[in-house]
Amino acid sequence: MAIVLYLALPQQLLVAPRFVLPGLEVLLLVPLVAINPRRLTRQTRTFRVLSLTLVLVIAASNMTALGILIHELIHAGVKDGPGLLTAALQVWLTNIIVFGLAFWELDRGGPVTRTQAPRDELPLADFRFSQDENDDAVQEVADGASVSSDWVPTLVDYLYISVTNSTAFSPTDTMPLSSRAKLLMSIESIAALTTSLLVIARAVSILH
């Protein structure tokens, strides 16, 4: 999805020829799929490096596109309001996807470790989910808690964190615990706030 959104960006927001970065991302994605073609059950050092590199490449290209977009607004006198709104939405959506992937890849050693390793051997958590605290709630809630059901967060849970962080600009029901989680959430919030207040506000003013 993030690759498709990048391909659809206006030419002036691209840092390289249109298919260079998406091609690199696909090259990184292919061996990841080859290592785990159906389910994420195997994690090698190569898998870990490739997956984190893929997230980093997407994040760097999207942040660069946001920087160029802001520069175009301030210095280039952009008049294409509808095109600007569309580009801002693409950058914002990619921001949600890439930070959701980053949270998913980093928390508790990554998606493979979270599902394959015993709970008492997991690395320290980067996030505190409500399921981690619900064991003393009413029965129908406690039944889904981490302690009683062996619940572990999935990609959807991390994308939800990313969505709420990009809209509320702060944690909601899931709290960051580690310094790296707080740093990543801060960067995402600042990028989302910049997009919302500067880019979209300027685009709407152009439309009027």
Image (cartoon, helix red, strand yellow):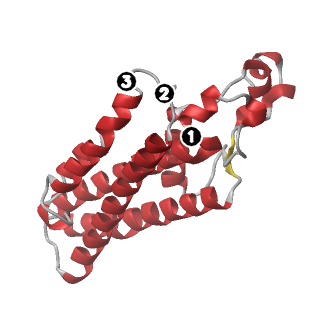
Q: Earlier in the sequence, mark 1 or mark 3?
A: 3
Tell me: 58 left or right of 41.
Answer: left
Residue beneath disc 2: 40
Quadrant assignment for the N terminus: top left
Q: Looking at the rendered structure, which numbered label has been put on residue 37? A: 3
Disc 2 secondary structure class: loop
Work out how far the residue at label 1 is from the one at label 3, CA to CA, in angstroms.
17 Å
**Amino acid type, callout 2:** Leu
Residue 92 shows in this picture = no
The residue lying at 72 percent from left, 31 percent from top is: 131
Residue beneath disc 1: 110
Work out how far the residue at label 1 is from the one at label 2, CA to CA, in angstroms.
10 Å
Tell me: 85 left or right of 156.
Answer: left
Q: Estimate how packed mark 1 is, as few (under 14), some (14 to 19) or many (20 or more) residues with alpha carbons within 10 Å.
A: some
**Amino acid type, callout 3:** Pro
Q: Estimate how packed mark 2 is, as few (under 14), some (14 to 19) or many (20 or more) residues with alpha carbons within 10 Å.
A: some
The residue lying at 52 percent from left, 44 percent from top is: 105
Marks 1 and 2 in Cβ contact (< 8 Å): no
Tell me: 85 left or right of 150.
Answer: left
**Amino acid type, callout 1:** Gly
Disc 1 secondary structure class: loop
Disc 3 secondary structure class: loop
Q: Looking at the rendered structure, which numbered label has been put on residue 72? A: none
Residue at the far bottom in the pictured view = 75
Most foreground residue, 197 or 129: 129
The residue lying at 12 percent from left, 60 percent from top is: 17
Residue 167, horizontal then vertical, whole percent: 49, 52
